[in-house]
Amino acid sequence: MTDVYIAGIAMTVFGRHPARSLEDLAGEALRGALSDAGCDVKDLGAAYYAGVTNGPLQGQLSIPGQVVLGKVGVEGIPVFNVENACASGSTAVHLAVQGLRAGSTDVALALGAEKMNVADKARTLALFEGGWDVSRADENYEALVRLGEGVTVPEGSESDRPYSRFMAVYAALARHHMATWGTTARQIAAVSAKNHQHSVHNPLSQFRTPYTVEEVLAAPPITHPLTLPMCAPTSDGAAAVVLCTEEGLRRIGADRSRAVRVAASVVRSFTHRTADEFEQGVGRRAAQQAYADAGLAPSDIDVAEVHDASAVGEIIQAENLGLVPDGMGGPAAERGDFSLGGRIPINTSGGLESKGHPLGATGIGQLFELTTQLRGEAGPRQVDGARCAIQENGGGLVGIEEAAVAVHILTHP
């Protein structure tokens, strides 16, 4: 199999950028990735653009990649538009990897960009309603929230402010995990507190305020067991990565010592499984394939970035990735195993909860953090001796799980 490398990668600060346009953010990420790779836009042979909100929020229903990339100097080459809900950015990277392995080019760009913060906040919340089968939206919602039955909901634990129905679904998944494995609200809060503490050291993070477990538990409720710091915000931002084959690295004169190898790139889709068929989960199947493709095991992983649109997601995905046994994610989080200095640091960037979640840019932002870690360039959030990293990024919901999950394994040197 043809080896593929990350030669250059960059991201903007994720957050609220009312004065900046989508192409301004995309341009910053593009220039950063090209500079990091030591190449020019003319060296690119193909581009993959990830965006979810261009149509519903900016009205660019078609060809968003050609429009946005054209404004920042990328033209004349094949441009592919990628939409896979929150997994769009990682899917763009996966397709770029496949194109490179197929020999269609030796240098490819994957770029994700979003402007989610608009004047009408209801429009932003409404776009999440497209993340499942819209012909069965109410049926889907009722089936998913039923997963949370059997856990007593304390009084005063429901927000009186509007929030995405996806957060109610995440809360139901959390309650199901609590009922099945004995996971506690405090353990979920430990994930959130840890990620907010990690984000203090990330200058590109949307939020950089540390929280204690007690402060997370006492924060304004969303819906039990989730409180506000446990949930990802709406974010503007962009991230870009330049990927190369060995030939591409030589052609652009990339610094080979900083090139990070993509040891595995996997995208899998949902199945109609039951909630208790954990071994059939899409995240678990994607991870198992990634480990097999890379010739590695969970015990080889030094650092991970996982999809924590809510804090319980980190616990679930740590189990799916095999980093801890089923049901042990909560206790591991409470012990500090997932913290910097712990057994397997997870979301050293601050995760989606703190770093932010501009949908199409999210997955590439995760890969930015892992590349930075493997290069030894993460500063005060550096994981000592990191040589092997895993990323998990999910998107949408069909049945009782993510519609799509991407998993990448990176190695260096």
Image: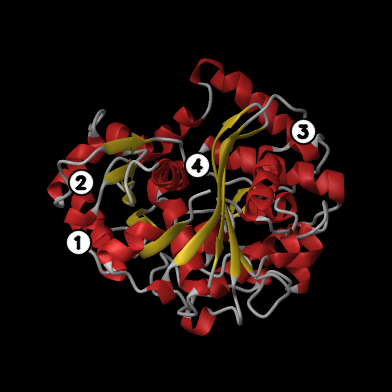
Residue 115 placed where, x, y %? 29, 48
Real-space Cα separation, disc 1 to disc 4, in angstroms: 42 Å
The residue identified by callout 1 is 40
Q: Residues within 10 Å of mark 4 (few under 14, many from 20)?
A: some
At a point 49% along the width and 20% down the height, the residue shown is 134
The residue identified by callout 3 is 275
In the depicted view, which residue is nearer to us: 214 or 204?
Answer: 204
Compared to 344, does 78 lie above or below?
above
Whether tag 2 and tag 1 are in contact, CB under 8 A, the answer is no
Whether tag 1 and tag 4 are in contact, CB under 8 A, the answer is no
In the depicted view, which residue is nearer to us: 332 or 76?
Answer: 76
From the viewer's perspective, is the residue at label 2 or at label 1 nearer? 1
Is residue 18 in sight in this rendering? no
Real-space Cα separation, disc 4 to disc 2, in angstroms: 32 Å
Q: Residues within 10 Å of mark 3 (few under 14, many from 20)?
A: some
Real-space Cα separation, disc 2 to disc 1, in angstroms: 14 Å
Mark identifier at residue 163:
4
- Of label 1 and label 4, which has the lower sequence position? 1
Q: Relative to residue 178, is residue 108 drawn left or right? A: left
Badge 4 amino acid: Tyr
The secondary element bearing badge 1 is classed as loop
Badge 3 amino acid: Ala
Mark identifier at residue 69:
2
Badge 2 amino acid: Leu
- Of label 1 and label 3, which has the lower sequence position? 1
Residue 313 placed where, x, y %? 64, 51
The secondary element bearing badge 4 is classed as loop
Residue 202 placed where, x, y %? 45, 74
- Of label 3 and label 4, which has the lower sequence position? 4
